[in-house]
Amino acid sequence: MSSPLLQARSLVKHYGSVEALRGASFEVSAGEVVSLIGDNGAGKSTFIKCLSGAEQPDSGEILLGGEQVRLDSPTTARALGIETVYQDLAVAPDLDPAANLFLGRELKRKGLLGALGMLDKAEMRRRARAEFSRLGVNLQSLDVPIGALSGGQRQSVAVARSVVWASKVVFMDEPTAALGVVQRERVLDVIRKVRDQGIAVVLISHNMPEVLSVSDRVEVLRLGKRVARFKAAETSLEELVGAMTGALVQEDAA
């Protein structure tokens, strides 16, 4: 494996008397899909919040490109090229796909019209069409509200939005939750395309067959700490479940 792009070393996070992270570590390289798995209560959500700037760890360190960074907000993380796709289909249903792609990053018209706040919808649509094509996102139309599209298409737009603006890392929290088989495979294809373009992808999923099909590596959290690491091509569903439940212990997982 190449040098890690993003590393977490011994992160600790308390919520009152509850220790959500107990020295958790993690790493992912550019152009790699790493799945982060664990049972409910393992600390996955807290861990990802710390790595995406939504929460700050009480101790430990986070390194990006070998340099220690402080991710004190999601805005700081985004400025460093780190984006997150959440499982709740965080899209604006009344806006079209292009407007969703540029949500919060709208392009303004040049000159006086831009100074007056008018948006360059034609340019946003042109760029959106190019980005969707690059990522293999096939939409019925760019002219309809995204709420009229299928669940798989809506999630593909949400994934594409993060990917377009991410230069280094994309976190995907259960991106295929509540999707059908065909829609799920469409989103997985987008993940593979993102990886092939050199971006690091961190996937959080409870779907073990999906994890094994799309991941290069798998890291397992249990009780707030990394307990195992696997190459996806060299492991099995039984090994992953064993690591999640504590039946399998790796000595070099810390």
Image (cartoon, rainbow, N blue to C red):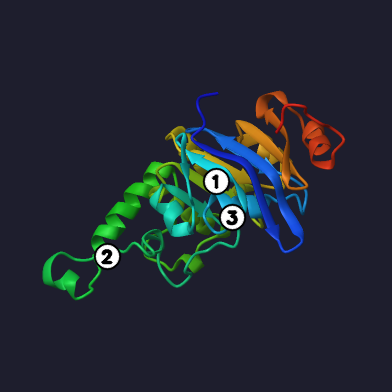
Q: CA distance from mark 3 to mark 1?
A: 26 Å
On the image, the x and y values in percent for residue 199 come to: 45, 38
Kindly indicate the quadrant of the structure image that contains residue 136: top left
Q: Residue at x 43, y 41 (%)?
A: 168
Across the whole image, how many numbered discs are drawn on residues? 3
Q: Is residue 238 above or below residue 118?
A: above
Q: Secondary structure at mark 3?
A: helix
In the image, residue 190 sits, relative to residue 91, either above or below, namely above
Looking at the image, is mark 1 or mark 2 earlier in the sequence? 2
Q: Is residue 161 visible?
A: no
Question: Which of disc 1 and disc 3 is earlier in sequence?
Answer: 3
- Looking at this view, name the residue that lies furthest to the front: 59
Q: Residue furthest left?
A: 111
**Numbered disc 2: secondary structure:** helix
Q: Are marks 1 and 2 in contact (CB under 8 Å)?
A: no
Residue at which label 3 appears: 49
Name the front one of labels 3 and 1: 3
Q: Amino acid at mark 3?
A: Lys
Return the mark for residue 121.
2
Say whether residue 147 is left or right of residue 26: left
Amino acid on which disc 2 is placed: Lys
Side (left or right) of 166 relative to 13: left
Neighbours of disc 1 within 10 Å: few (<14), some (14-19), many (20+): some
Whether residues under marks 3 and 2 lie with C-beta atoms below 8 angstroms apart, the answer is no
